[in-house]
Amino acid sequence: MPSPRYWREIPSRFRLEAVRCHGCGKVTYPARRVCPQCRGGELETIHLSPTGTVVTSTVIHVAPAEFAMETPYAVAVIETPEGARLMAQVADADLSNVRPGLRVSLEFRLIRQEGHGGILCYGHKAVPEVVHA
Amino acid sequence: MRDVAIVSAGMTQFGELWESSLRDLFVEAAVEALRGAKADHLDAIFVGNMSAGQFVGQEHLGPLLADQLGMVGVPAGRVESACASGGLALRTAFVEVASGMSDLVLAAGVEKMTDATDVTEVLATASDQETEAYHGITFPGLYAMIARAHMAAHGTTEEDLSWVSVKNHRHGALNPKAQFRSQVTLEEVMRSSMVAEPLRLLHCSPVSDGAAAVLLCPLDQAKRYTDRPVRIAASALATGSMALADRKDIAFLDAVERSAQRAFHQAGMGPTDVQVAEVHDCFAIAEICCVEALGLVERGKGNAAARTGYTALGGCIPVNTSGGLKAKGHPVGATGIAQAIEIFEQLRGEAGERQVKGARVGLAQNMGGSGASSVVHIFEGV
């Protein structure tokens, strides 16, 4: 990924910027120009809460080259309190517990290194919420 | 709109074909289709191909392949819809003939995958790059998430998934063009190495080379080329949300249902009219979801179809008699055309040991990405 592309995607990756549609209220992540539900174009920028629940997941054992050193690792679709859904790795977790319904917080983490220059690409990973006794 | 028929077909062996290049594969399939119809000209060529640019560093396939076929000057172009590129090429050719724009059109598909260094990364470009591939998800991983969603919603088990592979290998063992002509046992599938939980190696279609081609013309001209044409009763394309996260029900393939409904409406038929079907089993869970979305089984009941023999040869509705993508192989751009060829042969009574007796109506469903595009064709013996 060339660096301008990475830079362009920083608002969604670093700040979890999404949009809420004025017409129908749907929250979409990352931000779009047209609401996928009602095709409305009046969209307000919001920030997703850094928490959510696992909707579905997998554990990757055969990975693309850039992630080969990290296997096995969990990836999940997570729903935030705003109703937006996003994909993220689930880190610091017992992989057998990454199942639908698991409550997670979204933490700012290094996601990957890209290209010969090794550009550090950040974003959010999900981490199971600590349950206090 | 004119009625359109397939009059001839050609197909290479599917497999790891180290001695054949992309152009060799295309020419072999195309020449066989032309010879079968004794055709000496073409009005147009459409080639389905997912990613020659990344697999072998070659774009601009239209003129290259027309040239290689000795057809310089003929209108030719490549169409792409990831793993549904072949199906989209067939649909494009169908529209070209149905509209009256052209009379004799070659719909082909080709993919040369074994020359590539990182096939997993190239295939992942059919997912949403910004929101999915960025996080290290793979194609098996996306279908694994669909599988877990299906397990949670409908009680599907790893054994249900495995029966799909057992069935399709059993069919593939009867297909001389198949990459794998070996049967596998349930135990072998369930012991195979883990790729993306819950999907194991033997739940996944292989990396393949291959090409396939069919020749289309108006039905009222078909007798010039063959005494057994097969009519294309419907050709439908639909899209769904690109990213898994944007789908209301991750366990259901909306685009497949939409494409099927459009096709059945166009053909004036319903799922119970279909006697043989080729569906896009890139992963075992995909066949389960596709037979549901096509209406061949009830929603949520796809998991039992392979285990009970409902979708096996000899069952109520044989699915993937060719061996499917799992056993026949999955050279992605060629797959949609190869599926049509299996149905073409079934409806002409040429499928040998795989023949579904008396089959008159067949369906082929080809899917792109994690289900974001789907093409359905319905065929009828004439």
Image (cartoon, rainbow, N blue to C red):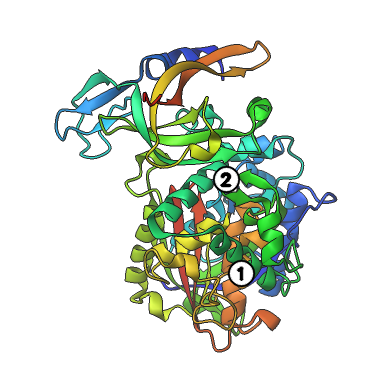
Left/right placement of residue B98 relative to residue A18 reads right
Left/right placement of residue B254 relative to residue B338 reads left
Furthest-bottom residue in view? B358
Q: Residue at x 48, y 33 (%)?
A: B132
Q: Residue at x 18, y 26 (%)?
A: A42
Instruction: Locate the N terminus of chain A and report the quarter of the image it occupies.
Output: top right
Q: Residues within 10 Å of mark 1 (few under 14, many from 20)?
A: many
Q: Which chain does the residue under circle 2 lie in? A: B
Kind of residue sitting beneath label 2: Glu
Alpha carbon of mark 2 to alpha carbon of mark 1: how far?
33 Å
| Residue A35, x across and y down, in percent | 25, 33
Furthest-front residue in view? A133
**Closer-to-camera residue (B101/B35):** B35
| Residue B18, x across and y down, in percent | 83, 49
What residue is shown with label 1? Answer: B341
- Tell us which disc is closer to us: 2 or 1: 2
